[in-house]
Amino acid sequence: MGWEMTLRKPLALLLVLLLPAVALGFWGKKTDEEKLKDALDSLKVHLYLAGKAAVTKTAGTEEAKAVKDRLLAVAAGATHTVQGLQGKEGAAPEGPKLSLKDVAGLGKALWDMRAVGKQLLEEDKDSLPPVLPVLLTPLGVEPELLALLDRPTDHAVLFVALTLVKLHPDSPVPIPPELILYEGSRMDPAQVKIPGFTSELYVLKAYTLAMSGMCDLAEKEALRLDALGLAPDPAQAAAGVKLLTGKELSLSPEQLGSVEAATQVLAQGSLALCFFGRGAWEKGQQALGRFLEAADRAGIDEPELHLLHAYVECSSKLPEKGKARLAALAKRKALSEDTRDDVESLQRACEQADAEGMQKIVGRARLGRVIVSVAWEDLKRSGLLDALGELPWVKAVRDFVTTLGQGIAKVPGALKVSLGGSGWD
């Protein structure tokens, strides 16, 4: 009995010492929900909510009035063209914009209101009235559309606007990803009243979460999308476009196919990137394969896509196919120096189990660029940019989020716009 007691004492002491370390191993890792909460509790989101509060509530302070006046002036003067977004020549002259002095003044006024935004976030009641009716009523937007702009739909339109400005290859404005996360987290696609785009909203939400390293939450949104179905319903899409444009427009089967391709490209590409970043290589490769299948269906021929195809083939049971693809790719004349170097590296690594060399080929920066490039090409082919791009209210929303993003970027401490571990840069 005595030796048992003697043995138990050091064992008990060892358990006491080890228990915190074991608990840290089990519970120290943050969940995606905790990561999201941490990401949203940032100065950039506080300033963004302050801007929304200034626009939607009675301007009771000089700072709120300064924010509201500047933002509404931009929306009211929304004569900017978006032909540049559509890759067209001969864009019309731009309308009035805020001067650098005005943008700096907006940043200062937002800074002075930061406590208002922080309080709104901490209350977490989604109590702000919708922004869009305030912005769009003076523009003569159809009453039928204005009547649908409740809180869920307001969040959805701002979420899409912020995402498209962020996604645009030549966007000059640093949209902080936290703002997109905020609007996406407050949006339930099932409650949005504009028909025809529910699948696309789930996709953009999954993309946003995945690009911020929240793979589990992104996968949940992708599963909801799978249950709903990827293909847009032609009648619903036509009803949605009519509501948004005021015109009878129907997308052709080819255009609807491009919408579906962009949907799959964004969802699967971002999931692949997220899983690779987490080190879940099997899940990442499965998602990457689905991303490449969607890009192939769209008929997009880019060297970077062939390089990613070769990566999948070289690391699977099809190394000979990968080698043949790489040999054909090496003969192309219009390859960048970096791409040519990677082709040669992959040729050496193909079938050699060089995990480090193979993973370099599908790095976060490269995959992120390819996802955006392919998705944007699909969006242009879908005709949605043409249908919506010239509408005054679309320009007003775009200019609102752009100007607010510029003002936030002028605030000290809000200049760095990337989330740790995200692929948004």
Image (tube, helix red, strand yellow):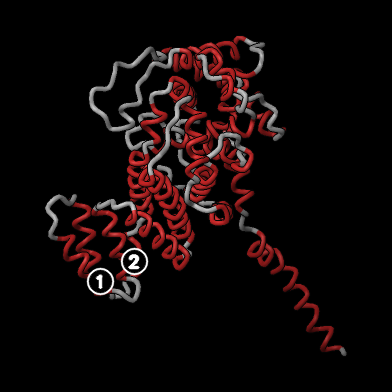
Q: Is residue 368 above or below residue 293?
A: above
- The residue to which callout 2 is attached is 312
Q: Dot 1 lies on which element?
A: helix
Q: Dot 2 lies on which element?
A: helix
Image location of residue 352, percent across then percent down = 28, 75
Residue 372 in view:
no
Image location of residue 152, percent across then percent down = 63, 34
Q: Quadrant of residue 41?
A: top right
Identified at 42% across, 23% down, the residue is 391
Identified at 52% across, 46% down, the residue is 199
Between disc 1 and disc 2, whose residue precedes? 2
Out of 15 and 208, give the one closest to the viewer: 208
Give the amino acid at mark 2: Val
Q: Quadrant of the N terminus?
A: bottom right
Identified at 45% across, 68% down, the residue is 282
Image location of residue 326, percent across then percent down = 21, 64
Out of 187 and 294, give the one closest to the viewer: 294
Q: Rate crowding at label 2 as few (under 14), some (14 to 19) or many (20 or more) other CA atoms within 10 Å.
A: many
Circles 1, 2 touching at the beta carbon (< 8 Å): no
Q: Quadrant of the C terminus?
A: top left
- The residue to which callout 1 is attached is 321
Which of the numbered marks, if any, corresponds to residue 187?
A: none
Image location of residue 269, percent across then percent down = 42, 54
Q: Quadrant of residue 226?
A: bottom right
Out of 240 and 419, give the one closest to the viewer: 240
Residue 325 vs residue 374: left or right?
left
Give the amino acid at mark 1: Lys
Residue 283 vs residue 296: left or right?
right
Q: In 3D space, how far apart are the residues under numbered discs 1 and 2 (Cα atoms)?
A: 10 Å
